Image (cartoon, grey):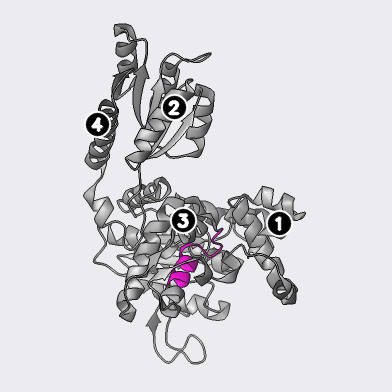
């Protein structure tokens, strides 16, 4: 599943574009072509490229301007300049602007291949030199991926783990907020101290205070002994408060005191206890919108939001999907004693274009189901759940419940517009708020 290098070739000569495209495609590269700098700039905004090959002499805008643009905006993209009008000035200018290789027309196929190989080797060497082995191997703590979106999360984890400041993780359900919290803790100086995870939405409000703060003997009916809470258990380490948005305003006031005073009051106790820990909170909703509605305290929000880390949804890190497929397929094949399955290009294409409302958790569940249920070693389109396939409508489709048809239609529209909620709402003829509710 190694990613093939993607190359953009820019030349106003259609013949030259075809020659380069054919020769590089034969070598296994993914090659795109455009005839001018304006189209090249637009293409760069939409696609992650390893290499741009550009002519210098082109109508309206010179290829040297494209070299400048790439160097100023895409530090991990290499540039190879080609020209049919060689001059010392052009060569010097292109190198000054940041071109990695310079090739003169008419070059041989071997010269083209060598120049491309050298440019890509330079890129690999630079990326390897800048890649911290600790980040790659240890900091992930179960987080799989290498896309630029998840690399940003790795960098944020690295910075946050060096501090004891309060951290707020924001991300949709299933994006891996607890994994990020654990990665922060286990890459910190407090790694040998406790990490306590608390699902604030999974504990009834009447029990949450006693679970968090503890209680003394006789504090209420049934309190037959003094028992510390999660805060005391996490003292010296980290506590992860998931679904923080589900806490009541009264509980939020108590949490604010913990953040401000670094102390907790056990239920029924006459004096408070000092604690020293890192607090990591997480939410799958926009807390600021809850502040505006009056259901979340503004002062608590700003106390929590010292180090914000946004975890991207799976649809925004599509380059990681093949890696995740491979990881989960291996995991469940080993667990079940099955042969490692392969996935057709069509399946991978569907996975990369699907909306993934449940994110990585949903992907893992689907892979687990496929490994369990499919006897063949090759998984293809008919093996996928019906809501993921674009099938021809027939009489059978008319016998589905309305809710199921609506669900499939909403998911298909979201997939087609690549998760753009505004476009999807417009196509469906509903407002964004209604669409958000349907997604939930």
Q: Can see residue 196?
A: yes
Mark pair 4, 1: CA separation: 51 Å
Mark 3 or 4, which is nearer the eye? 4
Say if 252 sits above or below 100 in the image.
Answer: below
Mark pair 1, 2: CA separation: 47 Å
Secondary-structure class at tag 3: strand
Residue 9's image quarter? top left
Mark pair 2, 4: CA separation: 20 Å
Q: Quick check: 243 left or right of 3? A: right
> Dot 1 corresponds to which residue?
433
- Disc 4 crowd rating (10 Å Cα; few below 14, some 14-19, many 20+) is some
The secondary structure making up most of the magenta span is: helix
Mark pair 3, 4: CA separation: 43 Å
**Residue 24: percent from left, percent from top:** 35, 35
Mark 4 or 1, which is nearer the eye? 4
Tell me which label, 3 or 4, sits earlier in the chain.
4
> Dot 2 corresponds to which residue?
17
- Disc 1 crowd rating (10 Å Cα; few below 14, some 14-19, many 20+) is few
Please tell me how many numbered marks the rendered image carries: 4
Q: Quick check: 87 left or right of 178? A: left
Residue 88's image quarter? top left
Mark 2 or 3, which is nearer the eye? 2
Secondary-structure class at tag 1: helix
**Residue 241: percent from left, percent from top:** 46, 66
**Nearest to the observer: residue 300 or residue 9:** 9
Secondary-structure class at tag 4: helix
> Dot 3 corresponds to which residue?
168
**Residue 425: percent from left, percent from top:** 71, 53
Residue depicted at x 25% and y 58%: 138
């Amino acid at each position: 599943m190694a990613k093939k290098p993607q190359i953009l070739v820019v030349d106003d000569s259609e013949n030259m574009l075809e020659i380069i495209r054919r020769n590089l495609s034969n070598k296994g590269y993914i090659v795109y072509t455009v005839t001018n700098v304006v189209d090249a700039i637009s293409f760069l905004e939409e696609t992650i490229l390893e290499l741009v090959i550009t002519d210098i002499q082109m109508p309206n805008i010179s290829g040297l301007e494209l070299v400048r643009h790439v160097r100023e905006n895409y530090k991990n993209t290499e540039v190879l300049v080609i020209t049919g009008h060689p001059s010392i000035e052009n060569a010097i200018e292109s190198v000054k602007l940041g071109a990695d290789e310079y090739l003169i027309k008419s070059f041989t196929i071997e010269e083209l291949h060598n120049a491309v190989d050298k440019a890509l080797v330079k890129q690999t060497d630079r990326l390897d030199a800048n890649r911290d082995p600790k980040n790659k191997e240890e900091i992930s703590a179960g987080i799989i991926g290498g896309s630029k979106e998840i690399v940003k999360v790795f960098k944020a984890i690295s910075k946050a783990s060096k501090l004891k400041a309060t951290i707020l993780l924001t991300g949709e359900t299933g994006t891996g907020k607890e994994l990020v919290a654990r990665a922060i803790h286990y890459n910190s100086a407090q790694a040998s101290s406790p990490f306590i995870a608390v699902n604030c939405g999974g504990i009834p409000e009447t029990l949450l205070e006693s679970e968090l703060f503890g209680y003394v003997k006789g504090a209420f009916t049934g309190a037959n002994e003094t028992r510390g809470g999660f805060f005391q258990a996490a003292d010296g380490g980290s506590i992860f408060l998931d679904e923080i948005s589900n806490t009541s305003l009264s509980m939020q006031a108590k949490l604010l005191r913990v953040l401000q005073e670094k102390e907790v009051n056990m239920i029924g106790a006459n004096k408070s206890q000092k604690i020293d820990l890192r607090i990591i909170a997480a939410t799958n909703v926009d807390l600021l919108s809850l502040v505006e509605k009056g259901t979340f305290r503004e002062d608590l929000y700003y106390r929590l939001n010292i180090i914000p880390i946004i975890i991207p949804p799976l649809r925004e890190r599509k380059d990681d999907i093949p890696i995740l497929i491979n990881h989960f397929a291996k995991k469940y094949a080993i667990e079940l004693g099955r042969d490692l399955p392969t996935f057709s290009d069509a399946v991978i294409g569907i996975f990369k274009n699907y909306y993934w409302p449940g994110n990585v958790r949903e992907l893992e569940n689907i892979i687990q189901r496929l490994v369990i249920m499919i006897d063949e070693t090759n998984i293809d389109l008919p093996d996928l759940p019906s809501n993921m396939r674009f099938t021809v409508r027939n009489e059978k489709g008319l016998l589905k419940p309305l809710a199921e048809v609506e669900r499939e239609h909403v998911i298909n529209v979201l997939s087609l517009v690549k998760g753009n909620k505004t476009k999807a709402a417009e196509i469906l003829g509903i407002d964004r708020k209604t669409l958000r509710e349907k997604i939930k």
